[in-house]
Structure formats: structure tokens, C-alpha cells
Amino acid sequence: MENASKALIMAASVLIAIVIISAFILMMSNLTSYQDASYRSNLSSQIAEFNNQYTTYIRDDVRGSDMISLMNKIVDYNNRYADTEGFTEMHITIHMNGQNEKLVYDEDYGNLLVIQDEYNETNITQIVGRPSSATNDISDGIIRELENKYEQKYCNQLASDIATIDSIRDNVNLSSSEKEDAFNAERLLPKPVSEYSGGLSQIYEDALVYYEYVQFKRAYFDCVGQPQYDQNTGRITGLEFECTGVGV
């Protein structure tokens, strides 16, 4: 009897141990499943948050001003995360479809800013500039150079009153000094012409560039084709647009 009791106690102990171990394994399995589900949920949220930055542009009639914001975003992203593990470069393609000439004020000069018929992430910096590695602020492009030279509000003023500048510059009845006096009288810049390198001719050419930039911001673009996605992460990696016209 005593041996039988001991055997039963040992069997019960083994059974209890098996139950405890099974319960522990089940608990760990459930915890792992919960952690996996939580990770997948967080990852899906991160992907959705990332893609939402770009899905708003997947439409027709995107204004040029919004395109500039998108280009800045892509240039900044590629510059900021280039050295990050798992980084996938963002791509953008913009087809001007021959609309460049509609951005021009003076046909004798032609396009001075949007000179290509196709832009992508490697050459859009000709329009939007290039992010500084230190601050990621967009800089170094011709537009930023002009805004640094004259200040943004005066650049806009030059573009808005470009016909006035052209009229003064083209007036054969005025001498060079009289043209400068006439321009200074319009108060389009905070300083007189003589304080800017290149004089009135350079100011006019700079105004042409900024005028083209303003017109680009008024252009319309359609998102064409299907967005490209990273097969591993599900993130958007490429968008394509074509210019459909220039409006007001």
C-alpha cells in the first residue's frame, strides 16, 4: 500500500508539472502572438502614416505650388535617410509635356529655370534647390539664391511688375542712368539699382527667372500611372506626373 501511495503521489506530481509547463508554454505562445500582432499593427500604422504623406498627391489638377512641396519633401527624405539601414530612395518623374514655353515672359530669353522637359529626383534640385546636410533646409538652387539676394517678398514683386521693368529697360528715349532712376522710382527693391551687381539688365533677368517660378507654381499636374511600392515594406517609393497646363 505504501509503495502504491508513493507511486500515485509521484504520478500526481508529474501530472501537475506537465499541467504547469503546458500552461506556461500556452501563456508564452499567447504573449508572443500578442506581441507579433502589436508589432504588425504598429508597423501597418507607420506604413499608412508614411504613405499618407504622398497619397494626397495621387490625383489630377495638382497645382505647381503643391508639386514644389512634394519635390521638397522627396529631396529632403532622400537626403535625410540616405545612410539609414533599409533605406529605399523615393522616385519622382515629372513630364512637362512641352508646357515649358507657357511659363516664359520674354520669348527672346526663353526658359531660364524649367529648361528640361522631364524632371526626376536627380535633377529637380534645379527647381527646388538642394537640402543642406546640416539642417535639411532647401538651399543652393537658383530660386533660393534670388530670394537671398533680394528677399522673397521683393522677388515676388519683381515677378508681378516684370512688365514695368521691361518697359523701363526697353525705353529707347531714356539713357542708362535715367532708366535706373525710373526703376528706383518704382520702389520694387529696397536698394537702388547701383547696389546690385549687373545693374538693371541683371535685375530683369532675375525677374524673368522668378516669374517663371511663379508661373510653374500656377501650373496643373496630373498623377499618371500607378504609384510604385516597396515590395518588402509596402511604402510608396515612386510617383509620376505630367503637366497639363498653366493657369491663374
Image (cartoon, grey):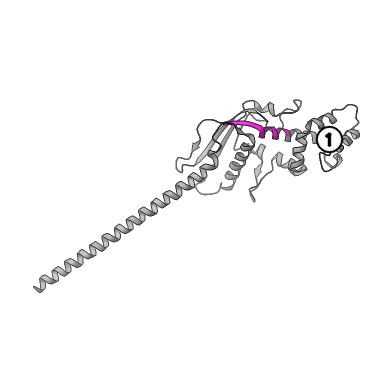
In the rendered image, residue 71 lying in the magenta stretch gets the answer: no
Residue at 64% across, 34% down? 64
Q: Which residue is mark 1?
A: 200
Residue at 51% across, 42% down? 51
Furthest-front residue in this view:
248
Residue at 58% across, 47% down? 80
Quadrant hosting residue 93:
top right
Between residues 120 and 150, which one lies in front from this camera angle?
Answer: 150
Local packing at callout 1 (Cα closer than 10 Å; few below 14, some 14-19, many 20+) is many
Residue 239 visible, this orientation: yes
Across and down, in percent, residue 52 comes to 52, 42
What's drawn in magenta, residue-wise?
A: 211-222
Query: What residue type is disc 1 on?
Result: Leu
Residue 206 visible, this orientation: no
Q: Image check: 194 left or right of 107?
A: right
Q: Image check: 57 left or right of 183?
A: left
Across and down, in percent, residue 219 comes to 65, 31
Between residues 131 and 35, which one lies in front from this camera angle?
Answer: 35
Q: Image check: 119 left or right of 23?
A: right
- Quarter of the image for the C terminus: give it: top right
- Quarter of the image for the N terminus: give it: bottom left
Q: Secondary structure at mark 1?
A: helix
Q: Image check: 196 left or right of 224?
A: right
Across and down, in percent, residue 208 comes to 75, 32
**Is residue 144 positioned above or below 103 on the image?**
below
Residue at 51% across, 35% down? 227
Between residues 81 and 46, which one lies in front from this camera angle?
Answer: 46
Across and down, in percent, residue 4 comes to 10, 70
**Is residue 139 positioned above or below 14 on the image?**
above
Quadrant hosting residue 190:
top right
In the rendered image, residue 212 lying in the magenta stretch gets the answer: yes
Magenta region, main secondary structure? helix
